[in-house]
Image: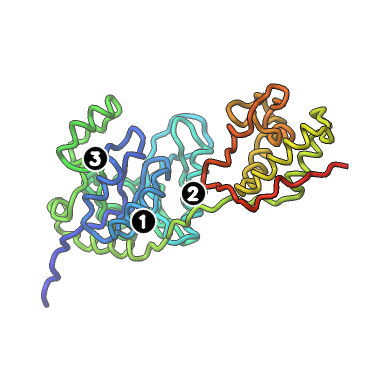
Amino acid sequence: MKTPPLPTTLTHLRNRTEHSYRTAYGKLERVLDHQQAKAAGIVDRHGTWGHVRWSKACKAKGIKPIFGVELAVVADMEVREKQPANFMSFLARNNSGLKELYELTSLATEKFYYIPRLDYDAVRDALKTGNIVGLSGPAPDASKIVGLKNFFIELNQLSPAFVPDLAKRLKYPLVATGDNLYPLPQDKAAYEIVMGDRRDSRTAAGHIIQAWEWLQQWPDYSMAIRIAEDIAKDCSADLPSAEMVHPPVVKTLEAMCADGAPERHINLKDPIYKARLARELALIHEKKFEDYFYVVADMVNWARERMLVGPARGSSCGSLVCYLIGITGIDPLKYDLLFERFIDINRGGWRYDSSFKGFPEVKFE
């Protein structure tokens, strides 16, 4: 029986990029330049800010993107004190997993104490749906990870020698990973300068290691590299395109302006105010900006009920609509402020139409 050939590429399920603030060094695109496999995962520490760029850059290079995050796991996230943390990674297997991943990251941020953090109960709950894959980190706590589902113990350049035996004893599969702080070995000096006293003083490699480097350290566990490939094939999450928020509209923008006028002591039957409002509403409609006004007005009025909110600033103060619906606190006509500083028909592709018959008349009874 022939021995299967050793793998020549390592699928990196957990790459850190520049979005791992004060943890890793190297532009996202440079990290991708040094991937040799057909798939690559992003697991920046504490956050998922790089997901959109990762998706676009991977697809441009013909690489399958895998979306994840690296989060601190402590004994009890409710206890407001510093605790020893194990940094574990989580990968989205599908789009449901992607949503759950973001919810998990939000939970860690909500439980922030010096850093975002989870505890093992939260990890257990997150993994039981089957939509998220858990990776142990280089030095898992054996007493804390018993009974986890969809969980793999990592084997990388930081893993202690006892890790394979631990995986066997707990009956978890081993998966080959890397633990990068910068893209290439020659980037180490730049990394140390940028990180300062926050730099990792490890003696193990901090660059994106390749399969031959991994096998030099773990020659008897090549199956772990194939398991990494299998996980990559199993992860099918696709980052959806951002869509405009469409809030439920109870009242039209025109009706909201009418409701706000008495509180602002504005007489909308006054020809000057009437004409100005008609012009603004027409241009807002032309630009299809109504949803923007609904969302911002809702946010500002919610905030005003709970905290001190200023009268606003910038070009929005030139809008009578903004004033009437509560976004700003300044009457633009009183101070001769121009609406065109806020929305200009000459910007963003608006073109003069020779059939234009004038702005519609707004009726306020």
- Secondary element at tag 3: loop
- Toward the bottom, the furthest residue is 1
* Spatial separation of the CA atoms under disc 1 and disc 2: 14 Å
Name the quarter where the C terminus is drawn: top right
Q: Nearer the viewer, residue 53 or 201?
A: 53
Mark identifier at residue 91: none
Going by the numbered disc 1, the residue's amino acid type is: Ile
Is residue 320 rendered to the left or right of residue 209? Answer: right
> What residue appears at the point 37 percent right and 53 percent down from the top-left corner?
55
The residue to which callout 1 is attached is 66
Going by the numbered disc 3, the residue's amino acid type is: Tyr
- Toward the top, the furthest residue is 335
* Spatial separation of the CA atoms under disc 3 and disc 2: 25 Å
> What residue appears at the point 78 percent right and 36 percent down from the top-left corner?
274
| Labels 3 and 1: the sequence-earlier one | 1
- Secondary element at tag 2: helix
The residue to which callout 3 is attached is 182
- Point out residue 141 in the picture as x, y percentages from the top left corner: 36, 45
The residue to which callout 2 is attached is 102
